[in-house]
Amino acid sequence: MHPLAWWAWALILAALAIRSSTLPVLLALAAAAAIVVHHRAPPQGRATFTVFLRLGVVIVAIRLGLTIAFAPGFTGQVLADLPMLTLPLGDAALRIGGDLHLPAMLSALTDGVRIATIVVCVGAANALCEPTRLLRTAPAALYEAGVAVIVGLTFAPALAGDLGRVHAAQRLRGRPTRGIAAFGRTLVAALDGAMDRAIGLAGAMAARGYGRRPSAAHPAPHRAQTAALLTALIALALGAYGMTDVHVPASVSIGLIAGGAVLAGAVLGWAGRAQQRTRYRADPWRAPEWLVLGCALTASLLLLPVVGPTGDIATRLPWPIAGWLVLACAGLSAALPAWLTPAPPVAS
């Protein structure tokens, strides 16, 4: 499978999670990502995805803990009456504790699950394809930035593998593996190993000439390329922001993203003509890749008209059951790559 197909699929699901504030939609997206990873990721990739799942749980717990501690001013059903401490803070006051309202907990839970779903989608992309394979598909004009990005993406899978190995080694040596102190020892050793691997990868790439670019003989075209690329990035940023704002029509956001992507692709192709690069065993883009991209786009077309930061999915359609049918179809479409794509090769 082409690595960009998995990353495009994961990023589309993450964009849907950013756009939505409905718990069933967020849980359906996270479940679809987990199903695809379970069926199509190699064993090491599944171990990496487990780390992202745990990180998502920690994010939700921290978000709920902050809400319980600071109890924002919501109204509604009171779940608990906690002791309250008021601290003076300039002209205002910081309130810790107090009445814990049900709307506050639901809002915090939704916010935490949204961030966790985004983390899970990115973790699914890391689990389904090796980050180093992305360097083969990087445009020639982005080799410098591509090396830095690949080294950064390699850090997470390496950290996940080192955590398991260090934990097993400490258990075999009879050392305690539970508790804060044991976790700290395991984390420090794993971080050291993952950082060494990332630095070693960067050194190996530099020794083989990755990320090198000859000096520019004509600076004027490079200035025009930089200006055009900056314009494309601004359009992409505005479109991405519009996807998170309900007051911006979805058509405007999608138009900005599409226009920025087209302009960025044209600029990268223009700048890449001056770069002489060779590729070894380039990954082909075939029917399974189109199926993965089509499944993600189908899920987005089903969900975007009926979800948003306000209201339930069922209230945006003429009859309530239609909303759940749309959600089920969208979740199934997002999870279809688990069965429509070829199984990963088994390491001998």
Image (cartoon, rainbow, N blue to C red):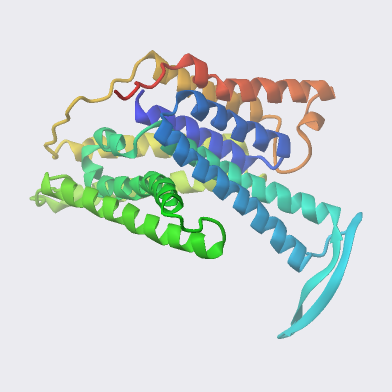
Residue under the point 52% across and 33% down: 12
Residue under the point 34% across and 35% down: 130
Residue under the point 44% across and 17% down: 341
Position of residue 15 measured from the top left corner of the image (x, y, whole percent): 55, 39
Camera-nearest residue between 342 and 45:
45
Q: Residue furthest right?
A: 77
Residue under the point 48% across and 15% down: 340
Apparent side of residue 13 relative to residue 284 in the rendered image (left or right) = right
Position of residue 168 measured from the top left corner of the image (x, y, whole percent): 43, 47
Q: Quadrant of residue 282?
A: top left
Q: Quadrant of residue 286?
A: top left
Apparent side of residue 210 relative to residue 79 in the rendered image (left or right) = left
Q: Quadrant of the N terminus?
A: top left
Q: Quadrant of the C terminus?
A: top left
User: Can residue 256 be seen in the rendering of this structure?
Assistant: no
Q: Residue furthest front?
A: 174
